[in-house]
Image (spheres, rainbow, N blue to C red):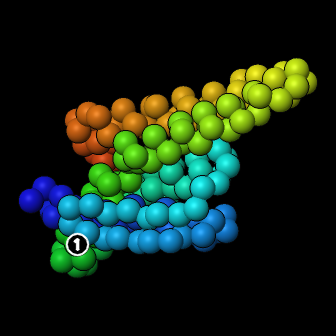
Amino acid sequence: MFRFLFYPGVIVHEFSHLISCLVLRVKVSKLSFGLRESYVKHDQTGPIRMSLIALAPFYLGFVIGAILFYFAKLAFGSNLLWFFVLNYLGICVLYNSIPSKQDTKNIFNTIEDHIKKKWKKNFGSKIAIIILILILYLPIIIIAQLVSAFDKFEILRAFYVLALFAIVYGIV
């Protein structure tokens, strides 16, 4: 029931993955918009592209949600139906913009596989992978962990939606 109520956001979430796959030229093999399970299956790719694909709903959802709230705010005085519809869609999109457990798992697994593959080589590649971990992979992992906290705690999702709503409406 709860998932059905916010289903428009699920569609935007999966389309965000799809769009990022298309932009990054990663082949998509299957797309599903089921009420129980929705997903985008795509080819394996490197850690950077995988991170961009997995986190795409968060970034695109933020932008789309903010735009929906902004247009709802503009519609407030003239058209109450659009005001409610756009706010509802903004809430749905933002609520579902948080990457799923599988999204963050894909990031971690891809980074881990890449490190294991490179670590087996010579000493120079081990030094390079340590630098890569510190400069690139560690920030990605930290961002993914922070964002995944929103998936674990529903109250954080609610605060996230309310915070953006308050910012767009000038309440904060």
Give x and y (percent) for residue 88. 23, 64
Which residue shows up at 40% across the image and 46% down it?
A: 102
The count of marks equals 1
Residue 45 appears anywhere in the view: yes
Which residue shows up at 22% across the image and 72% down it?
A: 85
Q: Is residue 139 left or right of residue 31?
A: right
Q: Is residue 154 left or right of residue 31?
A: left
Give x and y (percent) for residue 157. 29, 42
Residue density around tag 1, few if under 14, some if 14–19, many if 20 or more, within 10 Å? few
Quadrant for the C terminus, please: top left
Give x and y (percent) for residue 98. 38, 47
Name the outermost residue toward the left: 1
Which residue shows up at 88% across the image and 25% down it?
A: 122
Name the outermost residue toward the front: 120
- Give the answer, above or below, for where 43 lies relative to 145: below
Q: Quadrant of residue 138?
A: top right
Residue under label 1: 85
Which residue shows up at 71% across the image and 24% down it?
A: 134
Name the outermost residue toward the right: 124
For the residue marked with disc 1, what is the amino acid?
Val
Q: Quadrant of residue 114?
A: top right
Give x and y (percent) for residue 152. 29, 34
Residue toward you, 145 or 93: 145
Q: Is residue 142 left or right of residue 23?
A: left
Q: Is residue 49 left or right of residue 106?
A: right
Which type of secondary structure does the marked residue at label 1 adopt? Answer: helix
Quadrant for the N terminus, please: bottom left
- Give the answer, above or below, for where 32 lies relative to 99: below
Q: Quadrant of residue 82?
A: bottom left
Residue 167 appears anywhere in the view: no
